[in-house]
Image (cartoon, rainbow, N blue to C red):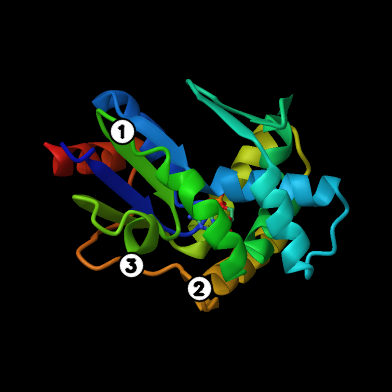
Amino acid sequence: MQTPVLTIDGPSGAGKGTVSRAVAKLLGWNYLDSGSIYRSLAVAALKADLDLSDILAICRVAEAMSLEFDCGDELIVKLDGADITSQLGTETTGNTASIIAAYPEVRAVLFQKQKDFQRLPGLVADGRDMGSVVFQDAKIKVYLTASAEERALRRYKQLIEKGIDANLPQITREIEERDFRDQQRATAPLTVPEGAHYIDSSSLTIQQVIDQVVNLVD
Ligand code: C5P
């Protein structure tokens, strides 16, 4: 039997991570946070002090890196045996990930690492190109989005709750820049995959989104 896949694509801050993890837990399926693979590579590239325009060097690091994921209640990621979870969520890591994710050579190296997550009884895969490239024949595809202002506000509140100083106009600008880079790149740009269910979460609670997605699987 072909392992069923549910893909959830969309821009950063739309709630994909929270929704995907909750849906995977409800269904008892595996979970792939593909952004964390790009973020892990960004951490590795920054640690090695690589020139971010040196595609060959980035590919070498991508091929050599060993990643371990513990997808419990909180995602824990180890890079070459070291826990890098706390470094994954920073703006520097996210922006670096978005820069190196624009290189087709890098995406080709990371392709198989993502495919390896397709194991029984099923997979919920979240990212930018899950339904359009990596799992093109997924049975169910979702495109989850929200306005840039709403996504920036959510990010701002998260940071303030953690006691981190944050600037809302700057976060909005960074989100818009990241959207632009992810949507305009030549390889695997962020698009609504053919046949995807389009959900705008701007005025929905996380629980309402989770319910809508689970209903698609039922
Ligand atoms: O989803 P997240 O914000 O963690 O992803 C970080 C960056 O990695 C994105 O801005 C995007 O450029 C890249 N990415 C990607 N394809 C994916 C997942 C993430 O290009 N499937």
Secondary structure category for the residue under label 3:
loop
Mark 3 near mark 2, Cβ–Cβ under 8 Å?
Answer: no
Q: Earlier in the sequence, mark 1 or mark 3?
A: 1
User: In which quadrant is the N terminus drawn?
Assistant: top left
Secondary structure category for the residue under label 2:
loop
Q: Which residue is mark 1?
A: 23
Please indicate, yes or no, whether residue 201 appears anywhere in the rendered image.
no
Mark 1 near mark 3, Cβ–Cβ under 8 Å?
Answer: no
Where does ligand 1 appear, by image quarter? Answer: bottom right
Q: Is residue 131 left or right of residue 1?
A: right
Q: Residues within 10 Å of mark 3 (few under 14, many from 20)?
A: many
Q: Earlier in the sequence, mark 3 or mark 2?
A: 2
Dividing the picture into quadrants, the one containing residue 69 is top right
Q: Nearer the viewer, mark 3 or mark 2?
A: 2
Q: Is residue 60 left or right of residue 8?
A: right
x%, y% of residue 197?
22, 58
Please indicate, yes or no, whether residue 97 appears anywhere in the rendered image.
yes
Q: Which residue is mark 2?
A: 187
Spatial separation of the CA atoms under disc 3 and disc 2:
14 Å
Q: Residue at x 57, y 69 (%)?
A: 104
Q: Type of residue at label 3?
A: Val
Would you place residue 150 above or below residue 117 in this image? below
